[in-house]
Image (cartoon, grey):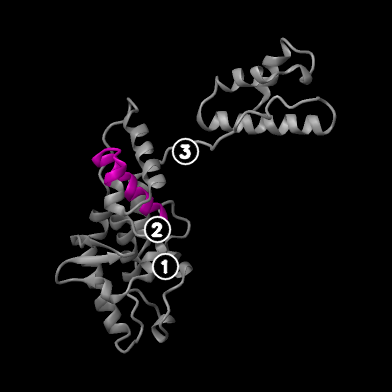
Amino acid sequence: MIRPALLEWSANHDHLREVTRDDVVAHVKTLQGRERHQALVALRSLFAWAKKNGVIFRNPTSQIKVGQAAAPVLQPLLPAQVARSAEAVTSHAGRLAVALAAVHAARPGSIRALQLDDTDLGNRRITIAGRTNPLDDLTRQLLLAWLEHRRRRWPNTANSHLIINMNTALATVPVSSWWIERELRGQAATLDRLRIDRQLEEALTHGPDPLHLAEVFGLDEKTTMRYADSARARLEQAAESARPGRTLKGIMGG
């Protein structure tokens, strides 16, 4: 990581103590983003060690701010990855959870916390983490299938959570984080990854507009900027064509 810098300086310097702040700045200016950040962190570590052990008298990196590493560009899931996860999930509860993550960008914790009263089938609405969203056809279909299964399996349960299992049907607690994710173990498209993919898809489809993302998903400023920046970077790639259509609805919609 810092070998190129050391080779560059060895052409003009005989010892590390001869390296100046200007030398360091000149080198890191040739780098960008995460590579720049990592190189500067490594150089600061090297010169700090050298000063501590008496190899140099002053640290030329001490007044150079490392700053925050640039966040990597978010990458969308491949259609095949989404398809494999959709095919791996066979339970009614699991299929509903996948739809909530992939269509509504619901976090696994928010899915577990959903209450029966959060669903409004008559008005085709669902409230997730305090935000009320329209209930699309796919999620509605999977929700109806789950509710029917829930009524048949546990007709007398007192648990008000939307998604329950054989253990929580006898209590009032939500299902565990392990249980809600169990069918997606080993898959690239986990519930959380499907959520991220849905938000990135929105940014790619409607343009990298942080205000739009904040309105649709209720995200904070830092998060919306990350999605917007990732969408902008992908849209600016000359070789990128339009993203292939999602396969989730076709696979899970019956």
Seen as rendered, the residue at the extreme front is 63
Q: Measuring 56% from the left and 28% from the top, which residue is drawn there? A: 36
Give yes or no for residue 197 being in the magenta stretch.
yes
Q: Are marks 2 and 1 in contact (CB under 8 Å)?
A: yes
Image position of 92 with respect to 4: above or below: below
Q: Measuring 43% from the left and 51% from the top, which residue is drawn there? A: 188
Give the labeled residue for mark 1.
180
Say which quarter of the image contains residue 195: bottom left
SS at mark 1? helix
Disc sitting over residue 72 in the figure: 3
Q: Amino acid at mark 2?
A: Leu
> In terms of sequence position, does the residue under pointer 2 or pointer 1 come before the other?
1
Image position of 110 with respect to 198: above or below: below
Give yes or no for residue 50 being in the magenta stretch.
no
Q: Nearer the viewer, mark 2 or mark 3?
A: 3
Any part of residue 3 in sight: yes
Percent x, y for residue 214?
Answer: 31, 49
| Cα separation between marks 2 and 3 | 20 Å
Q: Which residues are magenta?
A: 192-212
Say which quarter of the image contains residue 47: top right
Seen as rendered, the residue at the extreme right is 54
Relative to 142, 40 lies left or right: right
